[in-house]
Image (cartoon, coloured by chain):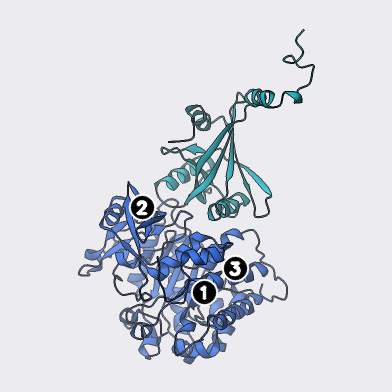
Amino acid sequence: MSKNNGELNLKQVAEKHTDFPQLIIRKIDTALRGVNFTERAVKKAWDLNALYDAAPELETKGAGLVFGGALFRDGTLVQGVESISSLRGRILRKDKAAPYTLDAIDGKLWLLDDKQPVEEIDFVPIPEYYGKKTSRGTPMIKVVRTGPPDCLNVNVYGYCLFWKEKLPCKYCCFQESLLREGLHTQESLDDIYETVSEALKEKGRWTGMRLIAGSDFRGKTPYENDSNEYIRVLKTLQRSFGTKNIYARLVASAVPKEHLERVKEAGAVAYEPHIEVWDKKVFGKICPGKAKFFGWQYWVDNIIDAVKVFGRGNVCSQLVAGAELAQPYGFKSVEKALKSNLEGVEFLAQHGANVSFCVLWVGQGSVFFAEKQTAAPLEYYVRLAKGIRDIRKKYKLAVDFNDYRRCAIHPDTDLARLDYNEVSYEPVGAGEGR
Amino acid sequence: MSKLSKEVVDLIKDCASIKIVTTTDENGNPHAAFKGCLTVLEDGNLAFAETLEGSQNNINLVRSLWFDKNVQLTVRGKDGKTFQIKGKPYKYSYTGPLYKKFYLAARKKRGQDSEISGVWVIVPEEVRDETYEARKKIEDELHPFFRHFDRESVLVK
């Protein structure tokens, strides 16, 4: 059981918030405390085809294990499982917070808290296309990765100019990979086409696709390069699917409306420009790159404009919740942080845009890691998830493309499972977004 | 040990049986749905496919799992033999072998544009014989004053 500096532990939070599913509190807690695997659990993962050794294909020395994922009984994702990946030991957890243990007991998988089994867990099989190669010999696992279980992830480009400018978001820990510039060639686009086409042969597996990249603000107009690359990949995916629209979500920078319309024309249906931190001043400190290119107001305007392009409920921003409490940059009280976040969520909801949050991850390589920052208290995330759910319900916003299956790291969108029928694609109340 | 007798299991596995799942929403409003695919797993738990993620049935099941509420399954054979099973939603699978089995079965039955959203596993807690004759016998024993006097078992000429 967690012993965090006087913060409420899971049992105390669950007793205080009886209207909040304990399984989702547990999920948040796994994100905060991490999960270590016993040798028996690792063996079980191999037995169940939930582990894949990609080291030879990725040409890494060790640390090439790819894990299919772990799910709670309700199908939500167990987080904090980096102990079974190359991120082992690279995530900073709260002081004295004991990690969970995942063990195999009598043939079943259990999450243990302080040696006590608390939840039965299922492993997710790796996809069938892992181990296959494209016609030019590229291992498909290098081209498209999966996770959560329903979702294919395509890298649009692998660098972030904020790192190059020495202005990374302070929680970002992908420094090494995001410094190498390089765009897709026709050959690498063909690899994407072949890999996605192969992945789509697996029956009953995929309902989500995520296109991701760093940030490239260059071009004749802001982020023109960024949108050009998304369009190239979208057109490749149109070949794989044989359709105009691609039911993918674009996790992208704040692309101006003129380019968003081009992106939509290329088949995009859902868009995620991540504001990360709502408060303008704190945003400037935590996300200096986004603040410089091209400022808080620019990013907010982009979210609102995006609703006009993609429609109500098809745009979702994201908060890296807990970052706004990092010292000396952020709020000094959780009440003020919560108030700020929920004001932002409601403001954007009035315009037809969603906001979800993920739990702050303090990973090696980030500014926060060097500063020994930590995530917010468990109860903070429970209150934030509740607050966002209430606002989403009030404005009847759908968030299907970013829910427990298609992204799986947002406690607030986990709760949307209870509200699937309470959505409207027409403006609600004072909302302007359509 | 499973709560389900062989008779109940056989009835559930009979394709000709009618199978209904009843759930309630947060205000207690009931919702019933036919579940022809309801089956019994090797461990004695019950399983059925949920076709639509946004169905009221599915939403109620998620809530029941999260907040430890019971659901009810009713099985009625072609000869009228009927059982009610109270149970708890234990697991919702949308990946792995169990899910795939149901998914491919749904495809076979409904065609290439069909799918399922997931598979629910229910742990049975209580089974009740709801067949008319069985219920009448219990009722007569517990409440003999409720019977009409012109019934054969009351008015013996």
Describe the element under mark 2 as helix, strand or loop: strand
**The one of A17 and A368 positioned closer to us in this rendering:** A17
Above or below residue A95? Residue B102 is above
Q: Which residue is mark 2?
A: A109
- Residue sitting at x 42%, y 68%: A31
Instruction: Give the mark nearer the N terminus: 2 vs 3.
Output: 2
Q: Quadrant of residue A179?
A: bottom left
Q: Which chain is blue?
A: A
Residue at the spot of label 3 = A389
Q: CA distance from mark 1 to mark 2?
A: 29 Å
In the rendered structure, the residue with mark 1 lies on which chain? A
Q: Is residue A78 above or below residue B99?
A: below
Q: Which residue is mark 1?
A: A380
Mark 1 lies on a secondary structure that is helix
Q: Nearer the viewer, mark 3 or mark 1?
A: 1
**The color chain B is rendered in:** cyan
Do callouts 1 and 2 mark residues in contact (Cβ within 8 Å)? no
Q: Quadrant of the C terminus of chain A?
A: bottom right
Whether residue A244 appears in this view of the structure is no
Residue at 54% of width from left, 56% of height from top? B66
Give the quadrant of the N terminus of chain A: bottom left
